[in-house]
Amino acid sequence: MATVVKDMLGTYPADLGGVDRDAMTKCIEECIACAQACTACADACLSEGMVGDLTKCIRTDMDCADICTATGAVLSRHTGYDANITRAMLQACMTACKACAEECERHADMHEHCRVCAEACRRCEQACNELLATLG
């Protein structure tokens, strides 16, 4: 099944310089999904009665959402490609996703939104790692 991300990568008029299109597609999709999950998790945390106990979770969710959004945007641009910037973004995204997953996992038994968010973060971290491995 084709996705918008895959379709857009397919329309790029120039060569992607040997970048694995499938790994790129998966990574962009996971970045978008993770940003959404983190944004929704932070919002859900704000609705919990014990919101004061979730301050670090909310902050980590918001940081991860911003970094995933930025990473997905950078990965969606190919003109004037700079592998060093791409690597740095992927590494930052993996770091943010790992931190957010760990924080959300601390609350996952009590808050379903944290469990779902942690899973999204782990998938994004893995997709970034897989794409990074293809960049050499």
Image: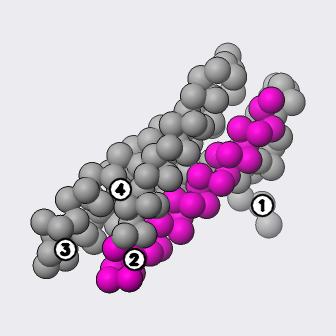
The amino acid beneath tag 3 is Ser
- Which mark is first along the chain, 3 or 4? 3
Disc 3 target residue: 47
Residue 111 x %, y %: 33, 80
* Of residues 95 and 65, the one drawn nearer to the viewer in this rendering: 95
What's the magenta region?
Answer: 107-136
On screen, 17 above or below 38?
A: above
Q: Are the residues tagged 4 and 3 within 8 Å (C-beta)?
A: no
Residue at image position (33%, 52%) is 60
Q: Is residue 6 left or right of residue 114?
A: right
Q: Earlier in the sequence, mark 3 or mark 1?
A: 1
Q: What type is the residue that disc 1 sits on?
A: Ala
Tell me which numbered mark, 1 or 2, is placed earlier along the sequence: 1
**Among numbered discs 1 and 4, the one appearing first in the sequence:** 1
When asked about the image quadrant of residue 89, the answer is top right
Residue 90 image point, x, y percent: 59, 37
Q: Quarter holding the C terminus?
A: top right
Residue identified by numbered label 2: 108
Among numbered discs 4 and 2, the one appearing first in the sequence: 4
Q: Give me the C-alpha separation between circle 1 and circle 4.
A: 29 Å
